[in-house]
Amino acid sequence: MSERPAPLTVAAAQPELRAGELACNARAHAEAIRAAEARLVVFPELSLSSYAMAAPAVALEDPALGVIAAACAETGAVALAGAPLREGEAEYIAMLRIDAEGVEVAYRKMHPDEEESRRFRAATDPAVLELDGWRLALAVCRDSMMFEHAPATAEFAKRRGLGGVDAYVAGSLFTPKGLVRRDKRMPQLARGYGMWVVQACFAGPGSDYSEVAGNSAVWAPDGSVAVRADERPGRIIKAELRF
């Protein structure tokens, strides 16, 4: 890129969610978007359904998502929300882009775990979201822990003529045990690629897990923590990404 883009304000939200209750969860997303006052607002894995394997797939045209699009229109935000997605006979763990123009699929998880794979198919294609001149590599939870995912996405960006990536953005869920490994991996990822890392993580009740860790965070390109939440639901953290 010949010119560096202006700073990008990014928020990672960990709202309190309810299993399978799309309308309630959509309202929680909209409230977080308004509170965040950020250009990009990132939500946890499967945030629209809550992380519940039995929850039904979310249709892109579901009117319940309108409150999120409306909040984005009011604030000028772009939201990245998690959802179970059905396409034909296959289902995926997806990251949806929602803004004033509506809803579209931004990314499908490439590395579901063993339990998730009983329902969801592994996608084969990385994704890079371009926003205000920023090149954002997209990931969902376990993707970020797989060493092949980041280089595959960086190579994808090069093939697309983008040159590379500036930030790695993930919606996730970690248990306290998994959080220890996450906290070792993300600084390495940031330093290794000289990029920002943004991770929105599930917090509170409403998932298939008895205990989740929260701790959404943003890491700077040098691997340092720019901002970090605690384990409680309702937290929103925000950082200004800049070169």
Image (cartoon, rainbow, N blue to C red):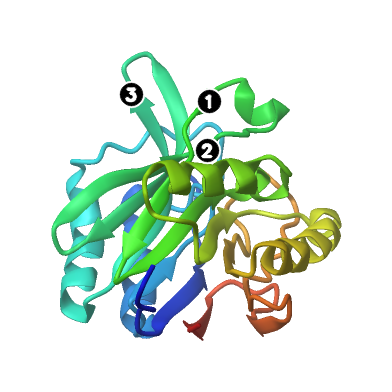
- Helix, strand or loop status at disc 3: strand
Graded by Cα atoms within 10 Å as few (under 14), some (14 to 19) or many (20 or more), the crowding at tag 1 reads many
Q: How far from the left and from the top, in percent, is residue 26?
A: 33, 58
Tell me how far mark 1 sits from mark 2, CA to CA.
9 Å
- Helix, strand or loop status at disc 2: loop
Q: What residue type is labelled 3?
A: Glu
Residue beneath disc 1 = 120
Q: How far from the left and from the top, in percent, is residue 17?
A: 49, 59
Q: Left or right: 168 with respect to 179?
A: left
Identity of the residue drawn at 27% across and 73% down: 77
Q: Which amino acid does label 1 sit on?
A: Phe
Q: What residue type is labelled 2?
A: Lys
Image mark count: 3
Q: Can residue 192 be seen in this view?
A: yes
Q: Nearer the viewer, residue 95 or 21?
A: 95
Badge number at residue 109: 2
Q: Is residue 168 above or below residue 195?
A: above
The answer to whether the residue labelled 1 contacts the one labelled 2, judged by CB atoms less than 8 Å apart, is yes
Tell me how far mark 3 sits from mark 1, CA to CA.
11 Å
Q: Residue furthest front?
A: 2
Q: In this view, does 205 lie above or below 132?
A: above
Q: Earlier in the sequence, mark 1 or mark 2?
A: 2
Residue beneath disc 3 = 87
Identity of the residue drawn at 42% across and 18% down: 90
Q: Earlier in the sequence, mark 3 or mark 2?
A: 3
Tell me how far mark 3 sits from mark 2, CA to CA.
14 Å
Q: Quadrant of residue 135?
A: bottom left
Q: Is residue 49 visible?
A: no
Q: Which of marks 3 and 1 is nearer the N terminus?
A: 3
Q: Left or right: 17 with respect to 118?
A: left
